[in-house]
Image: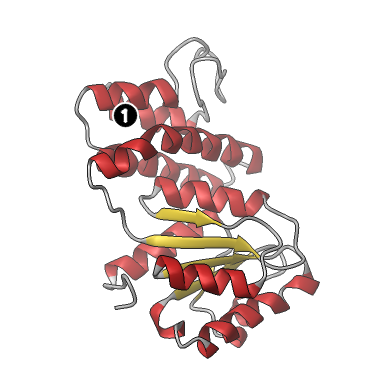
Amino acid sequence: MDVIEMLKLNVLQGRRNRYDDGLEDGYYGQPGVEELVYTALEQGISVQDILVRGLGSGMEEVGRKYDRKEYFIPDMLAAAEAVGMAVEVLEPHFQREQFRGKGKFVLATVEKDQHDIGKNIVGIMIKGAGFQVRDLGIDVPAERIVETVIQEEAPFLGLSALLDTTMKYMAETVELLEKKNVRHKVKVLVGGAPVTREFAEKIGADAYCKDAFAAVEQLDKFIQAGWANGC
């Protein structure tokens, strides 16, 4: 089995490094995602191939298993953490390879909302899919979100909310994008437990994403349709 296939397997096992057990027995002590990424780089495999063919393909299979109820939230978290470890190793190599990725993605949990687990999973997976992620964290006012979108010239924005009472700040952010005359330059994705497709349509978002897998799939659809940097 080559290193890319081993990467995919270890993403499926949720193994960050050799000290993780994995979802099945018999993996402890074997190279995990961190060690395998270093091996791939030493073998001259490009960052893009590691991200797309290794980590991305692995997470796609995690998504299919999750949809089939073969994996559950703890399994998905373990896989996402393994991908996050890999992205940390790869980030210094992005500029060296002039790896621009698929585009910039600004991500935030909206104002007065302190929840970040779902947002963090989305950020990790989108990085693993080849996007440049600027995560603003939790409880972020609309003004800061829009300011960052403008400064970064980001073609994608993700907004998360886990409370009914904070969903209104998603609408406020979309409205502010309009007021700043940049709404036409950015695709807005919204998600979180109380968020629905109907709500997304009501506030003028471009997509509702039920989970991190849906977010990655939707972003790739935008890319395939030729959307990047507001064009």
User: Residue at 26% of width from left, 48% of height from top?
Assistant: 99
Say above or below: 63 vs 225.
Answer: above
Q: Is residue 175 left or right of residue 126?
A: right
Residue 192 on image: x %, y % = 66, 63
Q: Is residue 79 left or right of residue 218?
A: right
Residue 129 on image: x %, y % = 38, 50
Is residue 54 in sight in this rendering?
no
Residue 50 on image: x %, y % = 30, 37
Q: Is residue 21 left or right of residue 35?
A: right
Is residue 223 in sight in this rendering?
yes
| Residue type, numbered disc 1 | Glu
Say above or below: 16 vs 18.
Answer: below
Q: Nearer the viewer, residue 86 or 143?
A: 143
User: Residue at 65% of width from left, 38% of height from top?
Assistant: 74
Q: Which residue is mark 1?
A: 5
Say above or below: 157 vs 114.
Answer: below
User: Residue at 31% of width from left, 37% of height from top?
Assistant: 93
Residue positioned most to the left? 44
Res 135 → quadrant: bottom right
Quadrant containing the N terminus is top left
Res 119 → quadrant: bottom right
Where disc 1 sits, the SS reads: helix
The residue carrying pointer 1 sits among few (fewer than 14), some (14 to 19) or many (20 or more) residues within 10 Å by Cα, namely some
Q: Nearer the viewer, residue 132 or 220?
A: 132
User: Residue at 39% of width from left, 79% of height from top?
Assistant: 185
Quadrant containing the C terminus is bottom left
Residue 92 on image: x %, y % = 36, 37
Res 138 → quadrant: bottom right
